[in-house]
Each structure stands twice: as C-alpha cells, then as structure tokens.
Amino acid sequence: MTENVKKLADALTAKDKVESYLSNLEKLKVEGSVTEEQYASISKEYYERLGQATSQVVLIKNELKKEHESIQQKISAQKQQMAVIEAKHKVGELSAEQFKAAEKLIEDLSVHPALFGKKDEPS
C-alpha cells in the first residue's frame, strides 16, 4: 500500500503542475503574451496531459480503495478469530496456555500489527 500512496502523491503532483501550466498559459493569453495559435497548440497538449494525469490519479485511488477493503476484511476476520478463542477460553475449552498460544498465532499472522499493540512494520 505504501508504494501506491507514493504513486498517488507523485500523480497528484504531476496533475497540479499541469494545472499550474494551464493557469499560467491562460494569464499569458489574457496579457497578449502568446498568440492565439500558440495558445491553441499548447493548451491542447496541456489538456491531454491533464486528462492522463487525472486518469492516473483515479486509477491509483481505486487500487488503494481495493487494498483498503481487503485489509479491512482481513482485520475483521482476525478480530472474529480472537473473539472465538477468547470465548473458548472463558468457557474452559482452552487453558490459559492454549489461549496465549492461539492469541500469539493470530497476532503473528496479523495484517495490521498495531491492531495487537505491535509497532507497524514498514511495507
């Protein structure tokens, strides 16, 4: 996910640059510093680049959304597993030792270490 976050930041930066170029071009047109032909040619290029950058941003956001949903589902399943072993321990099916072992196993398999009080490991 960290890689896609960086890609999103880069794509947003690229989009912002093109928007800035378009804004500057509009000012130059109003001032009469560029001809109508220059404006038409350059603005066409910038709008194409803006469309590509916008599409890239949308694509990356969708990828991040899918990753987030997947992680949320895994966290939910892990919470459910924890609740089951806790209930089994409370009713006496699992000893304290078995409960701790099962709890540790679930923690070790965790997609989100911070959920169980561990520091987040870099991706």
Image (spheres, rainbow, N blue to C red):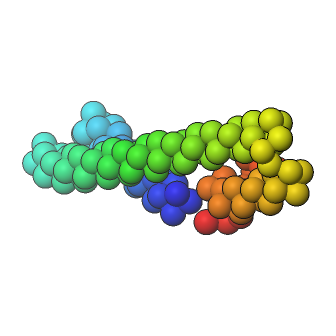
Q: Residue at x 13, y 52 (%)?
A: 41
Residue in front for this viewpoint, 91 or 99: 91
Q: In the image, is 84 to the left or to the right of 2?
A: right
Is 76 above or below relative to 98? above
Q: Residue 80 falls in which quadrant of the image? A: top right
Let me know if residue 79 appears in the view.
no
Residue lying furthest right:
96
User: On the rendered image, what quadrant is the C terminus found in?
Assistant: bottom right
**Residue furthest left in the image:** 37
Q: Position of residue 115 (x, y in %)?
A: 73, 46
Residue nearest the observer in this picture, 53 or 29: 53
Residue drawn at point x = 64 percent, y = 45 percent? 81
Percent x, y of residue 108: 71, 63
Q: Position of residue 94 (x, y in %)?
A: 80, 49
* Placement of 78 over or under 108, stated as above or below: above
Picture mark count: 0
Against 80, residue 70 (above or below) is below
Nearest to the observer: residue 107 or residue 59 = 107
Horizontal placement of 95 versus 60: left or right? right
Would residue 60 appear left or right of 36 to someone viewing this image? right
Whether residue 116 is visible here, answered yes or no, is yes
Q: Is 71 placed left or right of 11 in the picture?
A: right
Q: Name the residue rendered at 47%, 47% in the picture.
A: 70
Q: Nearer the viewer, residue 20 or 55?
A: 55
Q: Is residue 85 above or below residue 6?
A: above
